[in-house]
Amino acid sequence: MCDDRTVADNDHYLRSKKLTRRQFGAVSAGTGLAMLLSRSANAQAVSEADIDVATPDGVADCYFVHPSSGAHPGVLIWPDAFGLRPAFRQIGKRLAESGYSVLVVNQYYREQRAPVVSSTNFAEVRDILRPLMGSLNPDTQTTDAVAFVGFLDSQSAVDRNRKIGTMGYCMGGPFTMRTAAAVPDRVGAGASFHGSRLVTDAADSPHLLTPRMKARFLFAIAENDDMNAPEAKDVLLDTFVKAGLTAEIEVYENSLHGWCPPDSTVYNEALAERAWNRLLALFETALA
């Protein structure tokens, strides 16, 4: 996850490949250029707005974007530890252009409205992020998931006859699993990109929720995360098989934790695009 160990692990990994963070970013097209996410050839016109969503604990500031006409499958996006920011608005808008009604949330709304930090370098903002991250737990994730799915289902831009998808990055990965378990009859697909702590020894480990789910999943795992916990992918696969659910679980070679958001210091455009295409393939079939 986004913490000091991850920063050290990423730096060590880059040194082992004889790359600096600057060089890694250059290979990946650079953070600045990467912020301009490519549009699909058949991108739909979309409508977008910053909105407030009521939850049992208050009001969450969110970004809602959807095709300008018609009703479409809803998707709930959980950002990484750096929270709701322009990069995640871009991710949500890009997905909406592919035909989905997308809610991107500020998971820290109980403490602060977005944006919560101005940098995606954890070393620079750790003192801000640590208490924010510590303010969330499995209970808050579950109640929020129910509220956010309920919001999506109340919107005319969302087709309630089709399943809802959820996707999360870094700390948002476990949130997708708790969402799928909290609203199993509505959530048909989930995707975790370099998700953290998906499998733990704790009684509330996200992987133990799999029997409550009805969703198909995509787990895109960073190579250095897999090095730290090589058994996690096998545990995930085993739990999904036992639950009779489909899961695509892949370790992305040469990726670092955090490689998917376009403003990440270790963004890898080629691998991020590959994971994005797997996401679109999942949603196209699972949210029918």
Image (cartoon, rainbow, N blue to C red):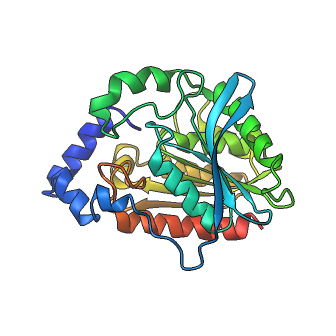
* Viewer-proximal residue among 138 and 199: 138
In the picture, residue 126 is in which quadrant? top left
Residue drawn 40% across and 32% down?
117
Which residue is outermost to the right? 161
Q: Is residue 78 left or right of residue 128?
A: right
Which residue is outermost to the left? 18
In the picture, residue 278 is in which quadrant? bottom right
Residue 89, position as x, y percentages in the image: 52, 50
Which residue is outermost to the bottom? 41
Q: Quadrant of the N terminus?
A: top left
Residue 213, position as x, y percentages in the image: 74, 47
Residue drawn 53% across and 24% down?
112
Q: Quadrant of the C terminus?
A: bottom right
Q: Is residue 269 left or right of residue 168?
A: left
- Asked if residue 194 can be seen in this view, the reply is no
Residue 82, position as x, y percentages in the image: 43, 37
* Viewer-proximal residue among 139 and 210: 139
Residue drawn 34% across and 40% down?
120
- Asked if residue 267 can be seen in this view, the reply is yes
Q: How many marks?
A: 0
From this view, report whether residue 28 is shown above or below residue 31. below
Residue 53, position as x, y percentages in the image: 71, 35
Residue drawn 76% across and 37% down?
146
In the picture, residue 205 is in which quadrant? top right
From this view, report whether residue 116 is shown above or below residue 22. above
* Viewer-proximal residue among 44 and 144: 44
